[in-house]
């Protein structure tokens, strides 16, 4: 997703978009695939289990 697309869809500024990208990378949820002709970002969603107590506190 481009910065312009994120801004239109989520009303994020460029700074918010870049901060989110860095945070996702720090948790190993965003992977950049670089090739000779393009750069692609892949977002991984991980499924996890939590207890009912944890769920209630979210």
Image: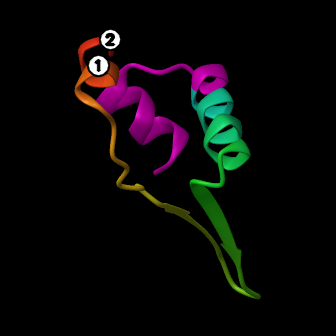
Instruction: Assign a secondary structure to mark 1.
Output: helix
Q: Residue furthest right?
A: 36
Left or right side of 13 for 11? left
Label 2: how many Cα within 10 Å (few below 14, some 14–19, many 20+): few
Residue at the disc numbered 1: 53
Residue at the location (40% across, 55% down)?
45
Q: Nearer the viewer, residue 26 or 7?
A: 26
Disc ID at residue 37: none
Is residue 37 shown above or below 29?
Answer: below
Q: Residue 31's spot in the image, x, y percent?
A: 63, 64
Residue at the location (34% across, 22% down)?
54
Q: Residue furthest top?
A: 57
Q: Are marks 2 and 1 in contact (CB under 8 Å)?
A: yes
User: Which residues are drawn in magenta?
Assistant: 1-16
Color style of the picture:
rainbow
Residue at the disc numbered 2: 57
Q: Residue 32's spot in the image, x, y percent?
A: 67, 66
């Amino acid at each position: 997703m481009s910065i312009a697309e994120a801004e239109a869809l989520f009303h994020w500024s460029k700074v918010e978009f870049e901060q989110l990208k860095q945070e996702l990378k720090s948790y190993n949820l965003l992977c950049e695939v670089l090739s000779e002709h393009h750069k692609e970002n892949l977002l991984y969603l991980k499924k996890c289990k939590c207890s009912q107590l944890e769920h209630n506190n979210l």
